[in-house]
Structure formats: structure tokens, C-alpha cells
Image (spheres, rainbow, N blue to C red):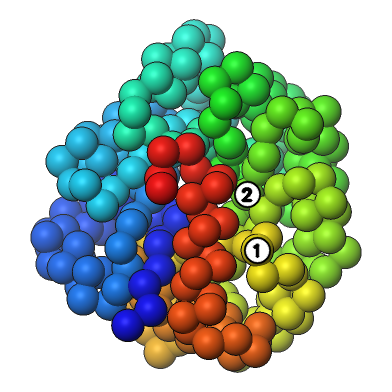
Amino acid sequence: MATFYDTHGHLDYPDFAADFPQVLERARAAGIRKLIAIGTDLASSRQCLALAEQHPQIYAVVGWHPNQAMEAPADFPEALRELARHPRVVGLGETGIDYYRLPADPAAAERSRQRQAALFTQHLKVAAETGLNCVIHQRAAFEETFALFQPFADRVRGVFHCFADGVEEMRRVVAAGSLVSFTGILTFKNGRNIRDTLAATPLDRFMLETDCPFLAPMPYRGKRCEPAYVREIATVAAQVKGVSLDELSVATCATAERFFRGLA
């Protein structure tokens, strides 16, 4: 059976508290060999690291999500550096820019934009210092996110996760030496544009993820997503790329191992 990695999941979320051992067993049975737990603030990052310490198949990415940027403490970079030293930490994030849920008040929205940009830049600076790459979140802000990332592109690679932009944006990311990653949206009936982007993406420049507990693929859409569902995403991805599941497994797992330090 072809095996895969779930390169982006929020395994610390309370959605998994009631049946976490069963979630891990279903992932194992589905051939999902490695799982990356993604932090969204310092408490979440520490919880992800604790999961990585407890379960050999789990690794941690630590950081602060842009939607909570206004809550990030002034000493966040120092805390991030400390977390980044742990051998089970394989990347930084998720970080980036999100303009989808800006405050309605113009002044508050501008403060949020400035704080998000500063926080994203802090992640990129720590990434450049530590040699870790960044898991990048962007929503309704590709140009702003890419502009902030570009000055670091010679020192830091990024994966633009849950990629939902077009072929042109994908090509710009790839030309900068970075990656994109695809979720269950790939399987949706209205996900044709995502499939078109995947079709144009080089086989060695993308990864697969669930972003669980969100975005469950078909036929589970609307239900809680979990790492086992990478197999449904992979099945559609293989069809789009015109390759076997075994070929897709080799390519995407090797890409993840090159990107996330210590994952191999």
C-alpha cells in the first residue's frame, strides 16, 4: 500500500480530544506514516510539541497564526527561538497574512495589517537564523504575503499551505524555490480551479495535507477531517497528475523530507 504524510494538521485542537488514539490508528491503517502538528500560538505550539514527544509519528511546527496576530506578545521572537531548538520541531508556522477576516473598523483593520506583517517578518527572521522553513498561511492576501516573503527567499523556503490560488501564483512560488500544498478542497466538485493548478504544478514541488479538523475531502465533506483522509486527497491528486499512488507517494514524501528539517 502506498504511504503518505499529512503535512498540516491541527492535532492539538479539542475536536480530537475524545478519540485521539483512534484517530492515530485510523491514520496508521490508511498508510499515513507521519503527521505534522501545526501550532497557532505559543500554547498551541507547546501542545503540538508535547504530542510530538509522546508519539514517534508526529512532528511539530511552531508559530503564531495571523488571525490572532494582535494577541502575540512583544517577546514572541525569543519564545519562538526557544521552541525552535527542540529536535522534534521541523518548521515554523503557521504564519503569514490573512485579510479575509479583518475588522470592519478601518483603523482596527490597518492595525491588524501592520501587526500581521510584523509577526510574519519575525517568523521569517527566526527561520533564517535557525535553518527551519516556514509554513505560510495566506488568505485574500497573496501579493502582500509574497512581497514580505521574497526578501527571505534566498535563505528560507516556504510552503504556501491550503493553496487555492491560480497557476500564475503557483509558478511564482515555485520560481522562488518554495512549495505549495493541497487539501481536501482538491476533491470538491467546485474545486476545478485547484485541480487545474495542481495539474500545472511540478511533481516535486507540492505536498499533501488535511488541515484537519477542517476541509474534509469527499466523501466526508462537512464532517470532521482527520489525517487518514490524506488517502482520499492523494487518490484525486494521482488522477490529476496522471501518476500511480506509488509514484505520488515517493514524490510527495521526498518533498516533505527535504522541506521539514528532521522529518526524514
Judge the density around disc 1: few (<14), some (14-19), many (≥20) Cα neighbours within 10 Å. some
Residue sitting at x 44%, y 65%: 210
Please name which of the two marks, 1 or 2, marks the residue nearer to the observer: 1
Q: Quadrant of residue 67?
A: top right
- Looking at the image, residue 259 sits to the left or right of residue 157; the answer is left
> Which amino acid, by three-letter code, is at mark 1?
Asp
Residue sitting at x 74%, y 70%: 201
Residue 204 is tagged as 1
Depth check: give the residue in front, 185 or 178.
178
Residue 159 is tagged as 2
- Looking at the image, residue 24 sits to the left or right of residue 66; the answer is left
Q: Secondary structure at mark 1?
A: loop
232 versus 52 height, above or below: below
Give how far across and how far down residue 153 sits, in percent.
Answer: 77, 34
Residue sitting at x 40%, y 89%: 219
Q: Quadrant of residue 45?
A: top left
